[in-house]
Image: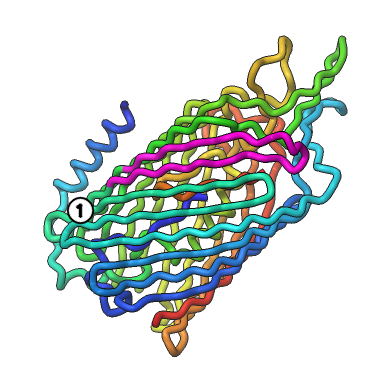
């Protein structure tokens, strides 16, 4: 999981009164797919500024995953369909991260560390970011480097213990456009090497003639990607609201091209209450080696994991924010996820993609101190 | 790389097209709803919700680590 970073530094001087001490919060995520997985994730987080030059942000979280997972794709009954794992999955992931920032006038540097451990996946990563404020802090440039050293294991195969190493580079700019608007654009590249196969996914294909073939998930041993994320904020004082728009273009050398667009309107109803309706749209093309059936001759790489297929998703959500006495803020979000092949933008979608419907709720309480 | 070139063009346009906003004019920019990220708890929860089901990820930061997400 890639953790989002803190506020743009160029905005911090104006927030000094609120941020010079700190904030601590707890957030609880509940996510449930229709007929599949259920995820519960409590997150405890804190951030603080001190001595005018230091900022620390840290969090710990636990993912508790239960339910069934799609394990086998087979055309035994005609068209290829997903078959769920027989036994109920019961997984737990512990994760934590910390980021320390030191400011030197117009320049600041951050170092971050993140650890994640679950029964079948271990991840250790670090990051370094440098920021430079220019043009009287109207412009902030950022450059970053990150590395992740992961271990892929399997709860079904004790012998599996493979590496996955990733290096990331990021360049970006945050620009104040006017007294009511700003934009941030970041370009990040990722270069991954190692084990990308999913040890739990299988493809079982029957042919009109000859014996059926059962093939394990086999993916390339590398993955290079580019993500271009642009975020825009504009406040409308007369309407008491703020437009929040995020767009990300993603592509990788597996052949996946994806677009993500989220538009939200944060509306202040009063000093105390605010609502934020949002709509998120996502679409991706299929990986070159995605197929719900095993063609003949059998290819070297093939995955029937529908997350690598061509599909799209719509996700509306509504957040309610209440600022209570004593610097306490309560935020609640409810959202709906609907992923389907007919939401795919352009070209042909993957016929074997099975519609996913899920609901989620996020409840958070934070307190400034 | 074409994407990097487009990024630089967009960056140049963005920076050159703007007029400086003085610190005393930044009251609206300091509002919580103008922040680029939600609070860390919400941001992680949202990221988790979508990253486990989609092939695309990343873009906002580096060094965040990964998960099995099966």
Q: Is residue A239 visible?
A: no
Seen at 60% across and 66% down, the residue is A42
Label 1: how many Cα within 10 Å (few below 14, some 14–19, many 20+): many
Q: Is residue A259 magenta?
A: no
- From the viewer's perspective, tell me whether residue A347 is left or right of residue A214: left
Furthest residue in direction bottom, as rendered: A325
Q: Nearer the viewer, residue A69 or A23?
A: A23
Residue range (magenta):
A143-170
Residue A93's quadrant in the figure? bottom right
In the displayed structure, A323 sits above or below A294; it is: below
Residue at disc 1, secondary structure: strand
Give the quadrant of the C terminus of chain A: bottom left
- From the viewer's perspective, tell me whether residue A162 is left or right of residue A264: right
Residue A187's quadrant in the figure? top left
Q: What chain does mark 1 sit on?
A: A
Q: Position of residue A319 (x, y in %)?
A: 52, 68
- From the viewer's perspective, tell me whether residue A70 is left or right of residue A6: right
Seen at 24% across and 68% down, the residue is A53
Q: Position of residue A61 (x, y in %)?
A: 57, 62
Residue for badge 1: A132
| Dominant SS in magenta | strand
Q: Nearer the viewer, residue A207 or A18?
A: A18
Seen at 67% across and 45% down, the residue is A120
């Amino acid at each position: 999981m890639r953790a989002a970073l803190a506020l743009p530094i160029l905005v911090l001087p104006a927030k000094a009164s609120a941020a010079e001490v700190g904030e601590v919060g707890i957030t609880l995520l509940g996510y449930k797919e229709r007929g599949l997985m259920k995820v519960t994730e409590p997150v405890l987080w804190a951030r603080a500024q001190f001595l005018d030059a230091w900022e620390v942000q840290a969090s710990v979280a636990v993912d508790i995953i239960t339910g069934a997972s799609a394990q086998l794709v087979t055309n035994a009954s005609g068209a290829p369909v997903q078959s769920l794992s027989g036994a109920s999955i019961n997984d737990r992931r512990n994760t934590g991260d910390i980021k320390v920032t030191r400011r030197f006038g117009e320049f600041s540097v951050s170092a971050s560390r993140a650890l994640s451990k679950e029964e079948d996946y271990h991840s250790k990563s670090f990051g370094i970011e440098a920021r430079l404020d220019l043009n009287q802090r109207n412009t902030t440039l950022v450059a970053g480097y990150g590395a992740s050293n992961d271990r892929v294991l399997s709860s079904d195969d004790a012998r599996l213990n493979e590496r996955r190493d990733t290096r990331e580079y990021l360049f970006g700019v945050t620009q104040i456009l006017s007294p009511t608007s700003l934009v941030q654009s970041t370009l990040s590249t990722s270069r991954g090497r190692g084990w990308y196969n999913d040890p739990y996914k299988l493809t079982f294909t029957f042919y009109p003639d000859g014996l059926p073939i059962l093939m394990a998930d086999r993916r390339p041993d590398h993955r290079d990607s580019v993500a271009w994320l642009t975020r825009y904020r504009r406040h409308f004082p007369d309407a008491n609201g703020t437009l929040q728009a995020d767009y990300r273009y993603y592509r990788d050398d597996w052949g996946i091209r994806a677009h993500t667009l989220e538009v939200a309107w944060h509306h202040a109803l009063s000093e105390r209450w605010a609502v934020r309706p949002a709509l998120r749209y996502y679409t991706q093309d299929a990986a070159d080696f995605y197929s719900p059936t095993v063609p003949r001759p059998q290819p070297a790489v093939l995955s029937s994991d529908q997350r690598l297929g061509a599909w799209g998703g719509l996700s509306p959500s509504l957040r309610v924010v209440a600022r209570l006495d004593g610097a306490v803020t309560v935020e609640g979000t409810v959202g709906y996820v609907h992923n389907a092949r007919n939401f795919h933008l352009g070209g042909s979608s993957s016929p074997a993609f099975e519609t996913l419907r899920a609901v989620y709720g996020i409840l958070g309480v934070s307190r400034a101190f | 790389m074409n994407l990097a070139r487009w990024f630089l063009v967009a960056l140049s346009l963005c920076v050159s097209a703007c007029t400086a906003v003085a610190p005393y004019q930044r009251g609206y920019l300091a509002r919580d709803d103008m922040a680029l990220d939600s609070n860390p708890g919400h941001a992680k929860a949202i990221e988790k919700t979508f990253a486990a089901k989609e092939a695309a990820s990343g873009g906002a930061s580096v060094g965040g680590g990964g998960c099995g997400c099966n």
